[in-house]
Image (spheres, grey):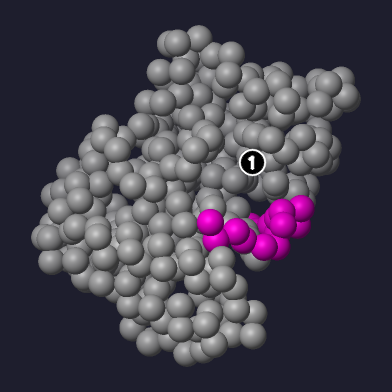
Amino acid sequence: MSFKKAHLDLFWGPHLVLNAGLKSDLPSLEKRNKPFDGVFISTRNRPDFVEQVLGQTGLQNLDVTVLATDPSDIRHQTLEKFRPSVIFLSELSPSLKAIASAGELPFEFPLVAKSGWDIWQKRNLILHLAQSREYRNILILDDDVLGLTPELVMKMSMDLRSHKISGLYFEGNPDHSLVGGLIYRFTGQRRRFLGSACLAMRLGQVTQPKFLNLYNEDWFFMFGNESGNVISSGSLVQDNYPRVYQAENLIAQECGDLIAEFWRYLRIKQSFKPGLESFEELIQHRISLVNDLKDAVWKSEMRSKEELASLEELKVYLVALRPEVLSKLFYAVLDRYGIRPENFKRIA
C-alpha cells in the first residue's frame, strides 16, 4: 500500500533531541566498584522472562530488586538461583500504594490504561525506593530485555556523567500501538525509540519522578525531564518477545500515541500554545490514517477480521473524541510534570 506522504511527514519523526551538556557530579567511575548502585526489574505474569533477564552477564554482581505484581510472577527456583530482592505490589502498604500511584491522572479518560496494567506504578515505586536507599544512579529494566553485556551496562553508566538519563534504542521492537504496528506491516517503517524498558538515571538530576497511567508513560517521563538531557547509549533487540502484536490489546495505546505525536507536531509547527483547532487537526489526521489502514488490511492477502474490527473500533472512538477532551488530557500531562505553557517551547 502507499500512504499519503503527509501522514508520515507530519507525525512520524524522532522522539528525542539528544544533546550533551550536563556537568558531572558523580565520582570517577574508575574509582567505583559497580556501574550502578542498584538495578530494578519490573515483571508481571512472565516467570520465564524473569529468569532469562536475571541471568545476563551485564547484571552479575549488581544489587538487583525485582518488582512483581504478585508472588506467582516469579518462581521459587529463580529466587534461589539469583537471590534478588523482591517486592510485590499486591503486598504494599497503603502509603507505598499511594506513592506508586503518584502519576495517576486526576480524571478518567477512555483507553488511558488497560485492566491490570501496573508498570507505571512499579516505575514510580522504583524511583521512591532508590531515593530512600540514597542511590546515586540506577538501571531500570523490563523483563523482556536481553543482550546486556558488562560493556554496554558500563557505557550507560558512563553516559550519566554528562546526561540525566541514558537509554537504549530497541531495534525491531513490536511494542507498537495498533496504528504503528500496521504501518510497520505495510511500509516497513518503524520508529526507533528510547523507552523505559532499559533506562539509566542520575537520581539527583531527575526532576520529575512521575510515570503516568497513560501510554506511553516513558516518553512523557523523558519529555518531562527535558529531552536535551537524554542520550542513547546504543541499541538492543528484544529477541525473547513474540514477533506478533494483538490488535485488541494494542488499541489501548492510542491515547498515549496521540499525545506523544502531538508534542512532535507542535515542534514541527513551532506552535506552543495550541488552540482547539490544533487538536481537531490531530484527530482528523488520525482518522484519515485509520481509513487508509482499513483499506490496506481489506486488500491484503493477510486480511484479519480482528484487525479490521479493532480499526473500526478505533475509528468510532476517534470520531466521537472531542478536541476539548483531548486538550484536557494534554494539559493534564503537562501539569503532572509542572510544565507551564510558556516554557513548553524549550522542551518540545
Q: Position of residue 345 (x, y in %)?
A: 22, 56
Q: Is residue 10 above or below residue 72?
A: below
Q: Is residue 150 above or below residue 323?
A: above
Q: Is residue 238 magenta?
A: yes
Q: Is residue 67 magenta?
A: no
Task: Kindly identify the amino acid type of the residue bearing the numbered disc 1.
Answer: Asp
**Circle 1 sits on which residue?**
142
| Depth check, front residue: 159 or 53 | 53
Q: How many marks?
A: 1
Q: Position of residue 136 (x, y in %)?
A: 54, 26
Q: Position of residue 131 (x, y in %)?
A: 49, 20
At x 13% / y 57%, what residue is drawn? 273
In this view of the protein, can residue 37 be seen by the observer?
no
Q: Is residue 300 above or below residue 224?
A: below
For the residue labelled by badge 1, is the local secondary structure a helix, a strand or a loop? strand
Provide the residue span drawn in magenta.
Answer: 234-248
Query: What is the chief secondary structure element of the magenta stretch?
Result: loop
At x 41% / y 62%, what residue is drawn? 313
Q: Residues within 10 Å of mark 1 (few under 14, many from 20)?
A: many
Q: Is residue 285 above or below residue 54?
A: below
| Depth check, front residue: 204 or 142 | 142
In this view of the protein, can residue 115 be seen by the observer?
yes
Side of 51 where 183 appears, left or right:
left
Side of 6 where 2 appears, left or right:
right
Side of 105 where 304 appears, left or right:
right
At x 60% / y 59%, what residue is drawn? 246
Q: Position of residue 234 (x, y in %)?
A: 63, 57
The part of the image, by quadrant, that contains residue 174 is bottom right
Specify the quadrant that holds the C terminus: bottom left
